[in-house]
Image (cartoon, rainbow, N blue to C red):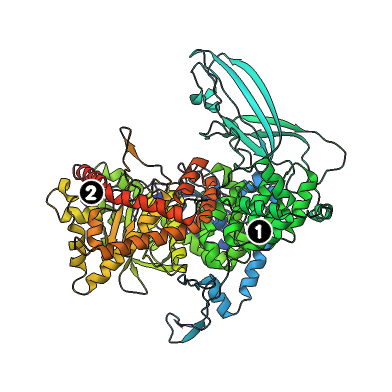
Amino acid sequence: MPPGMYFILENWEEEASQDVQIDFLLPTGIYLSLSVSRNSTIEAIKEIIWNKAKTEPLFCALNDPDNYVFMCINHTAEREEIEDEQRRLCDVRPFFCVLQLVGREGNRIEKQINSQISLLIGKGLHEFHSLKNLEVNDFRTKIRPFCEEKAMDRQRLTWYPWMMCNYPFELEPYPKLPETGVLKSRSSKKFMVNVKFENSEESFTLQISPQDVPLTLMQSALKKRAMVFREPKQDKVTDYVLKVNGRLEFIYGDYPLYQFKQDMSFTIEEPFQIHLLQASKVNVDDGMTDCPLSWVNTMVFDYADRLKTGELTLYAWPSTLDDKVDLLNPMGTVDSNPNIESTVSLTIFFPNFRTQPIYYPPTEKIIQMGMNGKASRASPEELQKLKEVLENKNYTEFFEDDKELLWKLRYDIRELYPENLAKLLSITKWNKQEDVAEMIYLLQHWPDLSPLHALELLDYTFPDRSVRAFTIRCLRKLSDDELFQYLLQLVQVLKYESYLDGDLTRFLLERALANRKIGHFLFWHLRSEMHVPSVSFRFGLILEAYCRGSTPHMKILAKQNEALNKMKSLTDFVKSSSQKTTKNITKEVMQFYMKQDAYLEALKDLLNPLNPNLILSDLCVEKCKFMDSKMKPLWLVYNDSFQSGSIGIIFKNGDDLRQDMLTLQMIKLMDVLWKQEGLDLRMIPYGCLSTGYKTGLIEVVIDSDTIANIQLNKSNMAATAAFNKDALLNWLKSKNPGDALEQAIEEFTLSCAGYCVATYVLGIGDRHSDNIMIRQNGQLFHIDFGHFLGNFKSKFGINRERVPFILTYDFVHVIQQGRTNDSEKFERFRSYCETAYKILCRNGVLFVNLFKIMQASGLPELSSSKDIQYLKDSLALGKPEEEALKNFKVKFNEALRESWKTKVNWMAHNVAKDNR
């Protein structure tokens, strides 16, 4: 550490060698004040206190040390019993430097597990008790034995299933048979895998035959929606005349059953609490404009299927709707806002019709009622018309005569076009008892759907529990790899679930407890949104259930959580220090802290959160640094225990990585679909994981550099670097001498084609030369997906994205190996692009459905139907393949013709970067 320099990371994380004065209160009333190391474990501190207490009065009144536990006020200002005595004092971080030794009560193991769960999920389990909510209590009572039973099932596994559960391997997607269109069977090809145990000479060989499993997904339930406020003209600055229009609506999914509207006018003489109603949205123009201020949803039937009765007070959520047409929020949570002190409340009254509770009718009774329906005989003309209606993939709304036809021929749809179930459900009259009963009866005998079509049923517009049961029936056929591919969307579906104890919740827990990889990512997808009030309790309860069913995994996750907390402390220090001193000094002190025991032990020997199949063993502190961007991300480098080289991860604190995570998931899905068609475009969907509020990890793609750096290093001036067409090719030549160059150019050609198509379809914006990288082996890939679905950046009202996708002449120069007229290689590149685009168009409905589900995520650029429409347009949904390809060819030529505009943007970016 440089002389005279003294930096503080946090109050409890100063220099590791520094001691802190702690006051200890003993059960005997004796008070001790001792200096202890911040790095000491609670167990070591207890031993010190016990030895000191031997010389104090009343020591004979104390029992065995194991009968006592330290209690403190923690950094969240709550009482905490420190059951895990292996924790360090700097990790406990008591709010006051006071530790009280109290008698241990209850089951020690149970209390220790509860404490570990609370720390891991970021919410004290006492908060669940304090809710005094019958549904919460019922869920915890029922789900715990469910998860513990799954844990017992896992313990009873023989060695091979146990290994596959805890250490699942990954296989590359493989092509379909052209003549059948089904996944190619590899029964004739067996994988021979040699397994060797660490620190042992024993090994054995596995013979693996991959099996083909279809994929599918699922959805949510009945909701009653209320209510939205409007605020009109504000006549004066000092006098507030407030008119509120309340809307109460009964909705089945998004199907309106009944709407009640009430105007309420009152005057506010002083501007108290106007901000709670979001008065900043008040329209002061002459005209009256609807302005959504707040909303709240609740169920008509409770978790036990009983019709609600009596008075109910609901606390509203502030509206973030930009669409002034739809003032309700049918996709929003059915939970009331827990922040009751500073939010709008609504009191409604459910009348009591009789002394005994009214229950929602059981499915068996509804099915029996639906059996009375009869199939109609269809004429040839009607069957032809039905085919035309169902083949229209770009439908938004059906005409009334189309709806009548679909309902009349519902049995024919089941027999001839079962994949169109979503369309039939969308036109069902959910306010008509007979139709609902017939639809549910039909579902009992409906053929299982393919994943592509079952995904549609995950939308919040299909809430019926029988539809949910049918979707789960399809979902259970998913392989673990297929389920993992859509796990991000399934977690979002939980947000608009009607009840805590639902089919989807149990299904996800069941599969997560049977496969540690799924459990790992389910945990982090839930944990990363624990700061969101609308889902905090729901996600916390699911996390608690998972932890109770997988206590061995909980210890691994706790290690990762501890490492992430240390990373956050380091970024906080770097941000503060970089404003006061030079970059080199800040880096030197950062590395000094990383070498201390508290940091070194936390940051090494943990499973990689981005890929739990990899162990981050030894931290290479000398290679660690922080990046120059605003949020000062950490660049951490680890030794790879199993292969030569290193593993790099970037920790970000201050940036929302959820959009990057979604975009990379879609690129991974595209890669899978292309490979299943025999097209490997050498994509690099690197790892990205959101772990909390604006925090997360990004995988470092080793041996790669940005186009900006490559061009700048090969040019004398930043202003001319972007126009140096030889820079990329010369860089590849330097990294791939001799015969290796041809393979590198092939890698570049394939990957460039893949990312041209992917960025066009997803509408990726902000494509400057620092957001496109190249590996030394030739693979091109894109990074930083802060703008997508056509939400392009602009400056001074001018759109900075002037081309459909990035295809510059220096890219073409590499593809043509530096030859100016090598049309054969360029046409092959064009063919790759067109083939890749056609494959995505054939799966367009899949992508649209996945993005529709993700609307519940709250991403700013995925909040309305307009965002989804961009995807429909780019995939030419509903258009013949020939027309879609023709449109893509136009975009391709435009991207090439207008690429000079891209170079101008890159030049401006380089100059701005050079002047910083």
Q: Secondary structure at mark 2?
A: helix
Q: Quadrant of the C terminus?
A: top left
| Mark 2 closeness class: few <14, some 14–19, many ≥20 residues within 10 Å | some
Q: Which residue is mark 1?
A: 417
The kind of residue tagged 1 is Tyr
413 and 18: which one is in front?
413
Mark found first going from the N terminus, 1 or 2: 1
358 and 575: which one is in front?
358
Side of 472 relative to 624 (left or right): right
Q: Position of residue 718 (x, y in %)?
A: 16, 47
Q: Position of residue 534 (x, y in %)?
A: 58, 42
Q: Which residue is mark 2?
A: 583
Q: Residue at x 64, y 76 (%)?
A: 156
Q: Residue at x 65, y 38 (%)?
A: 297
589 and 609: which one is in front?
609
Do callouts 1 and 2 mark residues in contact (Cβ within 8 Å)? no
Residues under labels 1 and 2: Cα distance? 65 Å
